[in-house]
Image (cartoon, rainbow, N blue to C red):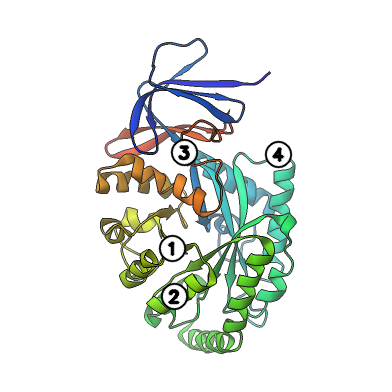
């Protein structure tokens, strides 16, 4: 017998409006939306609170935090994935693209091995096959072109892995996100505990690796996306030339452009612009890049990612709702827009035929509180 979920007396956040009414799901699908809020046997009375689509996260580093909760402390992969999954569910995220780095530097003492992403993907895929995860997980490969092993690591993935996104990343010192070397020094010395001498050696090594591999590796990442059927994304575009290259490569969305001029170029080339939720919540970039709120005010923001703080994704949508005075538009940056950017057409909006991935929330002093979460019509939080 098909399980029926009826949510009534709710403020339904639809694509273009908020409407008080009732939403009905049968099985894993939304089957009916009405403006009636009359009592229905078996219905859940939402008490006038909001119902919105489940959040869609395209790029999160949160799994890495569970894999290494403290520097040099390695946590079992299975337990890390399960904890990450539960945390995201509690934050209202019902679809996630788990970012896994491919491209390592075995010659460096500060690098993971080149089996990291393959082994982690195997654990994730096994948990999915066993139906052990609360939310929907996809693989997002972060292809680091400033590395030594990118091609070998990409070749370990096949179409059967369902790699949905490949983002092309370049963390060469004095380029893109780290165009300002002092910012990179702060990042590397704090995260890696490098001395000034070690930092200088690290920079020299990375620049040498980039000079040797970057062009070849960028081509390899694009070829892998074509082979695997993955959506291709750019990362940390800084100059117009970066965006022009993205357009030539067929990249459909840009992760975290670092400058206003790069974001404007993305709009000119019809490349969707994604910014980080922590940037919106804090009011500024932690690395001195362009403010996400400034881009939003200039209509240069399409998608928001939690980046490294899962709870920030939902709160950032409310920040945008206030900034734009348009809650439905803001909610789309964390639901419909990311779903479509990743090629998912079955989720991201409250509409008949869409997946029954839902959140119930209320507002308290301009902050949102997620009270309940459903994935495919099943309560998970």
* Disc 2 to disc 1, C-alpha distance: 10 Å
Residue visible at 47% across and 82% down?
Answer: 173
Marks 3, 4: nearer the viewer: 3
Q: Which residue is mark 1?
A: 271
- Per the image, label 2 sits on a secondary structure element best described as helix
Compared to residue 126, the image places residue 260 above or below, namely: below
Check if mark 3's residue and mark 2's residue have beta carbons within 8 Å: no
Residue 296 x/y as whole percent: 30, 56
Name the foreground residue: 351 vs 166.
351
Q: Please determine whether, in this image, residue 280 is positioned above or below residue 5.
A: below
For the residues marked 1 and 3, what is the alpha-carbon distance in whole angstroms? 21 Å
Determine which of the numbered discs, if any, sits on residue 244 in the image.
2
Mark count: 4
Image coords of residue 154 (percent x, y): 69, 69
Of callouts 2 and 1, the N-terminal one: 2
The residue identified by callout 3 is 349
1 or 4: tag closer to the N-terminus: 4
Which residue is the site of mark 4?
131
Residue 83: give x, y in percent of width and height. 60, 46
Q: Residue at x 60, y 71 (%)?
A: 222
Q: CA distance from mark 3 to mark 2?
A: 31 Å
């Amino acid at each position: 017998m098909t399980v029926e979920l009826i949510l009534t007396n709710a403020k339904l956040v639809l694509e273009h409006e908020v409407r008080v009414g009732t939403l009905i799901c049968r099985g894993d699908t939304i089957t009916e939306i009405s403006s009636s809020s009359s009592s229905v046997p078996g219905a859940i009375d939402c008490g006038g609170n909001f119902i919105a689509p489940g959040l869609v996260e395209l790029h999160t580093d949160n799994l890495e935090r569970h894999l290494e909760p403290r520097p040099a402390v390695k946590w079992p992969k299975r337990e890390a994935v399960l904890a990450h999954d539960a945390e995201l569910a509690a934050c209202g995220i019902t679809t996630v693209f788990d970012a896994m780095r491919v491209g390592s530097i075995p010659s460096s003492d500060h690098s993971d091995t080149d089996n990291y992403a393959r082994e982690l993907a195997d654990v994730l895929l096994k948990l999915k096959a066993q139906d052990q995860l609360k939310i929907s997980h996809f693989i997002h490969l972060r292809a680091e072109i400033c590395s030594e092993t990118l091609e070998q690591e990409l070749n370990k993935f096949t179409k059967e892995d369902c790699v949905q996104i490949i983002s092309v990343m370049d963390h060469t010192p004095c380029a893109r996100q780290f165009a300002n070397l002092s910012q990179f020094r702060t990042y590397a010395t704090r995260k890696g505990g490098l001395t000034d001498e070690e930092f200088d050696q690290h920079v020299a090594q990375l620049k040498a690796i980039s000079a040797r591999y970057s062009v070849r590796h960028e081509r390899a990442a694009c070829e892998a996306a074509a082979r695997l059927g993955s959506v291709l994304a750019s990362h940390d575009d800084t100059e117009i030339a970066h965006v022009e290259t993205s357009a030539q490569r067929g990249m459909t969305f840009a992760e975290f452009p670092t400058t206003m001029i790069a974001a404007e170029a993305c709009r000119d080339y019809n490349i969707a612009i994604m910014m980080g939720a922590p940037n919106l919540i804090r009011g500024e970039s932690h690395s001195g890049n362009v403010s996400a709120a400034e881009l939003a005010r200039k209509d240069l923001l399409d998608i928001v990612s939690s980046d490294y703080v899962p709870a920030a994704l939902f709160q950032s949508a409310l920040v945008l709702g206030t900034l734009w005075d348009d809650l439905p538009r803001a909610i789309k940056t964390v639901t419909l827009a990311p779903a479509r950017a990743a090629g998912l057409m079955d989720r991201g909006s409250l509409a008949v035929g869409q997946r029954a991935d839902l959140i119930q929330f209320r507002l308290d002093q301009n902050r949102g509180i997620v009270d309940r979460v459903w994935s495919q019509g099943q309560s998970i939080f």
